[in-house]
Amino acid sequence: MNIPAILERSTKAQWEVFIQHSRKTDLQIRQDRTEATIRQENTGYGIRVIVPRTGGAGVGFASCNSEKELEATAKKAHDLAKVNRSPFFELPERSRLPSAKTVDKKIFDDEEAVASNYAEAVQSIIADEKDISLTYGKVRTYIVKNRIANSRGLSRESVGTYCYLEMTFKIGSDNPTEFWPTRYARRISDADPHRLVPQWLDIARSCLKRRAPKTKETTVIFSPSIVCDIFVPTIGFHSAAEAVKLNLSKFSKGTKVGSDQLSVTDDGLYPFGLRTNPFDDEGQPQRKTSIIEKGVFRQHIYDQLHAYTMHAKSTGNGIRPKAFAIDVDDRYLVPPANDTTNLSIEPGDQSLETLIQEVKEGLLIHHVAWLNPDPITTRFGSEIRNAREIRNGELGDAIVGGTLSGSALELIQNISAISDKPEIVSGYSFGCVAPYIRCDRVQISGPS
Amino acid sequence: MGNGNVRESNSVIGDLQQALKLIELPYADGLYDWQADLMVRKNKDREITSARSITSISFRGFAAKGWLYSSSNKTDRTTIRKLASTLAKSTGGATARLAKPSAIKVDEKLPVEKDTQQVPLEEKLQRVRDIFNLARSMDSRILDVRVNYYETIMERALVTSRGTRARQVIPRTRIAVEVVAKENGVTDHDYLNLGGTMGFEVVEDVTEQMIRETVQGAVEQLKAIPPPRGPQKVILDPGTVGTVCHESFGHGLEADQAIRGRSYLKDMLGKKVASDLVTICEDSTLKGGHGSYCFDDDGALSGLNTLVEKGTLVSFLHDVETAAAMNAPLTASSRTQNAAHRRFIRMSNTYSKPGDWTVDEIIKDTRNGVMMAHWQYGMEDPLGGGMQVVSMKGYLVENSRKTRPLKSITLTGRVLEVLGAVDAVSKDGFLTDPGNCGKGPEDIVPVGAGGTWWRTTAVIA
């Protein structure tokens, strides 16, 4: 099918098509059994049309997952563009692309076998546990091929692999509690079951003896996945040029926004990062952009629309976001937005153990329910699901229950240390490379 | 009968039914799903107009190695036979039993007052622009207004090896208005959120007064103070009550979680879980409810289920697998995001039934406390029964009067303690809010949640 010809014929305007083909295997398990096996293949098309109009443009977006609906979808996008009122901008032209590591050969060669072997490995590891059971788990592997083309002659293709892991570990039998981690990775070695699952089981085991926290302001060390869920929606939002345009960004160039220890880049080329790709979802080359350096805000990130309208250069941040209800293989469904690629927090030079040793009294929080900070105010409040008390530099009782609350923008001013080993992580947010981060004066509330 | 994608679906349903015969497992079914939507978003920077049309089909069989699914977005006969053949190769039906819903022959569309398909696109956009302009004009402190209009039509057809051939068309429409205010370097916001299995009437029914209250809410937040922490009397608005009933309480009633040993309510059937004033229902037939449907994705007809009757737990939520395992009646609670996803036990419209108080009486009877308003989000804890419910704002109640505005409020503690401490339920103000719910972080389905006002004793974080 000659898709460019169809789009030329149907739209007679600037057009862009994003085509995503995916194959995935999803194994859902419980202790030693398989609950469900799901195999899926899908091809989707996201079409954007830009029609010039007096004082701006009309932009329409339509998507489908049927080749035979392609022409009708292009016409729909055109019809939507004709009634839309937006600023005018031009789609990107061809340019040189950097290289990026996005494919795990093992997943690419046999994604079904990798999922199956992973599930078996998890079940074998958990079989030896006495006090912990796997009440539910998902092991999923994907091969995703992206293609983007536009009316300015741009045509690009890339391939990526992913795996997704979700486990619920039931801890104890009388008055049990739970540890419920999730993790995306691009290659299986970043989520090696023989390394990751024992780490998760250690956290679970520590919660056998637990108590609720007391209400106080205290020092807290956050796990990388919590850092992801706090920072990506807030630092990401305030770093975007769109927030500047809307007068909502709290970040302006050269101002101090965080502790001296905090340096953050948006790194679209981080090897095997979750949003690593040679080009963004508009076709612009991805790159590494310094956002915060030693606590000072350096630069906003731009997609094509905001680069054009704000007279800046695109930083490769036109992203079809993975969001609530949008999986990594559903991205053709959403129009590009001004979003982060991989928010990468520069590691410090101290180990996690040293960070703990320096704390007289505090908490190490591994997991909370759903942080979901408000991007505008950056406020959040979330139940503590799995944490450890720190007393005189040593880990003590497990802490379960109660609430962690605060504001992300206040939190980053109170960072007192950052650990030395960053991890590619995900939580409810997607695309982050984070170490452990220690903050002072964090509000913890007990449940009674 | 309904519209939807009739020509396509009739042909696909026939092909699914034919191909189903290839699968020799004791139970198998075929699902067709087509969803088309239109989204219009406006803020001061730009408008986003976006439309989607997504098709998925799947076969599912109950085998010795659990449920097997094979799915695709392609609906041609060759693909359909190929998908069925994948399952046909599986041998050994599951030894576990499945409940048997009666074979149904249904072809229904949930009715709406004003079908969005009959409203011109220009009219929809103009309404969005009118709401945007009105809100922007109401106060000089308004920094931005975001109006989100969303309409969707879902057509879903199910054929089963037990003879069911059913099709339903579910239209849903939502309108959300978020107003952002700024003054003296402080930025804050408030929202209006309406919708359900409704048509364009939900947008036409947005009044100037509703917009004014949202604008005033955003401006009021600029001077709001943090809530007082600790245990205290808490008055919850209907949306927040719905979030407690759905997120904190209801997820523990999904029987698949009970069977996994992952429910804090597993051994509580017939026992007291809330105060006598609390009755909680699940109603997939609720008129206009965002979570309403005609039949669930196992082919059980939708209905009203009472979960908690005057404080006593009387029912879990079931699909064909758990109803058989727990020897319980089906509750039509098997749902999926689309045919490419697994079916799970899910809520539909969850609400608390009205009580005897008026809202004014509850406030007058509360010497000091906190009122939570405009729920923001909640999170399930099916095993632990912990609480995380966050409202966007609230008010202090001082000397039996609603006084100062409060910023975001987080309710913490144990849900059974909060339900057990409910000492007033209003008879007025019933509503259910539209929302979307995941089984964990994935598998999203539309739901409704609400009730009337509650007063309880709880801990504010």
Image: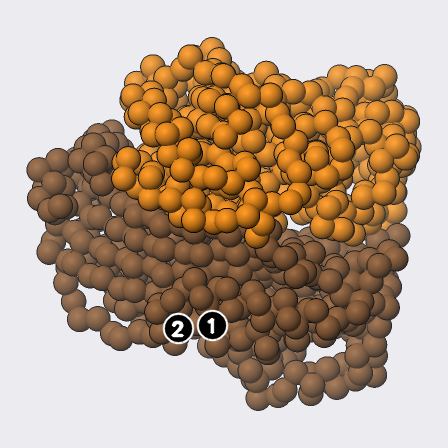
In percent of width and height, residue B110 lies at 49, 16
In percent of width and height, residue B7 lies at 29, 21
Q: Residue at x 66, y 61 (%)?
A: A32
Up-down: is A352 above or below A255? below
Q: Residue at x 63, y 80 (%)?
A: A417
Up-down: is B99 above or below A140? above
Q: Are marks 1 and 2 in contact (CB under 8 Å)?
A: yes
Up-down: is B71 above or below B400? below
Q: Quadrant of residue B298?
A: top right
Residue tagged 1: A188
Residue tagged 2: A106
What subunit carries mark 2? A
In percent of width and height, residue A274 lies at 43, 66
Indicate the secondary structure of the residue bearing disc 1. helix
Indicate the secondary structure of the residue bearing disc 2. helix
Q: Residue at x 37, y 29 (%)?
A: B18
Q: Residue at x 53, y 27 (%)?
A: B162
Q: How is the image coloured?
A: by chain
Q: Answer left or right for B175 relative to B241.
A: left
